[in-house]
Image: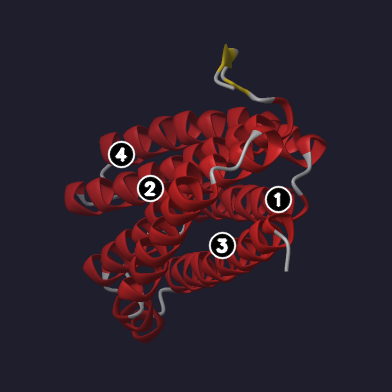
Amino acid sequence: MTLRQHLEEMIEELKKQVAEMADLALSNLREGLDAFKNNDLELAKVVIKKDDQVDQYEEEIAKQALKIIWREQPVASDLRLVTGILKLITDLERIGDHATDIAEMTLHLEGSLNKRVLPITSKMAEIVEEMVLLSIKGLVHVNEEIAQEVIKKDDLVDELFQQLITKMTTELKNDKIDANELIYVLMVAKYFERVGDHAVNIAQWIIFMVKGTHKNTLLF
């Protein structure tokens, strides 16, 4: 086996691990969102128990990526790919963490979610799930166009968050929502927003893999 073939083999294995981590993070997120939307307390408990699995993937992938950089000394597109993976696994791990956060808030709400704000929170959940799904698709295919789709959707999440704040404020003024419930729902919505931000971060690292630039800064 040539040195080039050995490097390619290591990179393919790294990409496989990242795809597995991404699938797990997405699965946890979907379950966390479903638990919240359906007030499913048992599913929320399942999500919380699975949090460590994503963390383990992050640790193993980071070790493998650093090993490739130190031992194989990749250059150009190979180096961008490995560096990008090393960076974006933090965002995948945080998505997994926020899935757990959402599940924990679902337990705090104890099935008392205000139905009048559910359409907004459900729409937020739908968009952030789509953003994460697209970011993973873009990652698997290292596709800049898909990454740009993710970035474009971020404003929608921000707009819905502002709509939710307005709606919740009105509900509170009219004594139609408990103050504690308001806090929990806003925290969940903030986690939705952060998941969207992490999907955007992943998209930006995909663009870096393709073009060598990140947030208009030349890195390689």
Q: What element does badge 3 sit on?
A: helix
Instruction: From the image, tell me which residue sits under label 3.
Output: 18
| Of residues 102 and 49, the one drawn nearer to the viewer in this rendering | 49
Tell me if residue 203 can be seen.
Answer: yes
| Of residues 171 and 56, the one drawn nearer to the viewer in this rendering | 56
Instruction: From the image, tell me which residue sits under label 2.
Output: 191
Q: Is residue 131 left or right of residue 59?
A: right
Numbered label attached to residue 174: 4
Q: Is residue 135 left or right of residue 89?
A: right
**Label 2 vs label 1: CA separation?**
18 Å
Q: Position of residue 117 (x, y in %)?
A: 46, 50
**Label 3 vs label 2: CA separation?**
23 Å
Q: Position of residue 87 (x, y in %)?
A: 46, 42
Instruction: From the image, tell me which residue sits under label 1.
Output: 134
CB contact under 8 Å: marks 3 and 2: no
Crowdedness of circle 4 by 10 Å Cα count: few (<14), some, many (20+)? few
Q: What element does badge 4 sit on?
A: loop
Label 3 sits on what residue type? Val
* Residue under the image location 51 percent in, 53 percent down: 68
| Of residues 91 and 10, the one drawn nearer to the viewer in this rendering | 10
